[in-house]
Amino acid sequence: MATILDGSLLAKTIRTELSGEVEALQKSSGVTPRLDVVIVGDDPGSVAYVNMKRKASMAIGMHSEVHQLPADASQEHVLDLVHSLGGSGKVHGILVQHPLPRHLDEQPILDAVLVNKDVDGISTLSLGRLIVGLPGFRPCTPEGMMRLLAHYAVPIEGRTAVIVGRSIILGKPMALMLLEKHATVTICHSRTKDLADICRHADILVAAVGRAEMIKASWIKPGACVLDAGYTRFEDGTHVGDVEFQATCEVASWITPVPGGVGPMTIAMLLENTIKAARRAAGA
C-alpha cells in the first residue's frame, strides 16, 4: 500500500513556520509582507482560488489585496494595473491569476510583473533563471511537489521521471527542477505515442493534464512515486485527480491524494515566496 504524500499536513507545518517569520520581520523591520493578486473576470474557479490565497495570506499575518477587473478589461488596463503594483513599495508579491480571458495576450502581462515581485515564478525572466540555474522564484506548484519529495525522502538522483503535461506553469518547470536533482526526465503530451508504456518506466510519475483519472493503475511501475497535480470537480461535488487513485495505491510506493496533496503545497510556496520578497525589500 502506497505512502500518502500528505500535502495538507506539510503545508500546515510550513505555514506555522512562515507565521513566525512574518512576526519576526514585523518586529525587526516594521514590514508586513503583502501579496497583491490581479484577476480578470469572474470565473467561479478562479475567484474561489484567489480568495483561498488571500485567506491563507491573512491567516499567517501577511496582508493581501485582490484587484478584480471586468472580464472585458483591455490589455492596456491590465498592464497599467500590474505596472502600478510593481511601482508600489508596499507591495512585495504580485500574482496574475491565469488563465486570462482569451482576448488578452497573457505572456506580456505576466512579463510585466517585476522579477523581484514575481512570486508565482512564471514570467519569462523567472523561468529563464530556472533554466540556467540562477537563484529566483520558482513556479509554486512544481516547487511544492519538490518539497513533498524532499520531506518524504523520495529518491530522485538517477531515477527515471515521466511528466505528463508540458505547461509553462507546471510540466516544463517540473522537468527542469527534477533535472537539477539529477533525474532522467521525459515529458509527454497530447501527441506522445505509447503513453501508457512510457509511464510504466517511470520511477517518478507527474500527472499534470487536467483529465479525470486519465492515468490508470496499469500504467504505474510497481514501487513508483506518483504526483497528481490534476483536479476535476463533478456536478455532485465529488472530485478526482488525473490518476486512478485507489487502484494506484495498490501499486505505487508513494502517491499524492486529490485533494490534500499538491494544492495546499502550491499555496504554501506562494506565501513563502512573498515573505522572501518582503525580506529582500527590507534588506533583511
Image (cartoon, grey):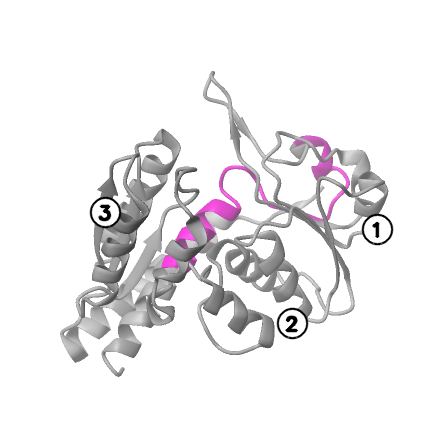
Q: Is residue 13 visible?
A: no
Task: Return the x and y of residue 207 as percentages of the image width and height.
Answer: 65, 44
Which label number is shown at residue 201? 1
In this picture, residue 149 sits left or right of residue 90: right
Q: Is the Cβ of the residue at disc 1 closer than 8 Å to that at disc 3? A: no
Task: Return the x and y of residue 186 as percentages of the image width and height.
Answer: 76, 56
Q: Can residue 270 be seen in this view?
A: yes
Closer to the observer: label 2 or label 3? 3
- Amino acid type at circle 2 is Glu
4 and 219: which is toward the camera: 219
In this picture, residue 42 sits left or right of residue 133: left
* 48 is higher (above) or lower (below) than 33: above
Q: Distance between the residues labelled 2 and 3?
A: 34 Å
Q: What element carries label 1?
A: loop
- Tell me the residue at 44%/42% (across/down): 99
- Tell me the residue at 43%/37% (across/down): 102
Circle 3 residue: 66
Q: Which of marks 2 and 3 is nearer the N terminus?
A: 3
- Amino acid type at circle 1 is His
Circle 2 residue: 180
Q: In which quarter of the image is residue 93?
A: bottom left
Task: Return the x and y of residue 243 as percentages of the image width and height.
Answer: 66, 36
Q: In which quarter of the image is the C terminus?
A: bottom left
114 and 136: which is toward the camera: 114
Closer to the observer: label 1 or label 3? 3
* 85 is higher (above) or lower (below) than 97: below
Tell me the magenta residue range. Answer: 246-270
Residue 158 shown in magenta: no
Q: Earlier in the sequence, mark 1 or mark 2?
A: 2
Which label number is shown at residue 262? none
- Amino acid type at circle 3 is Val
- Tell me the residue at 51%/57% (across/down): 144
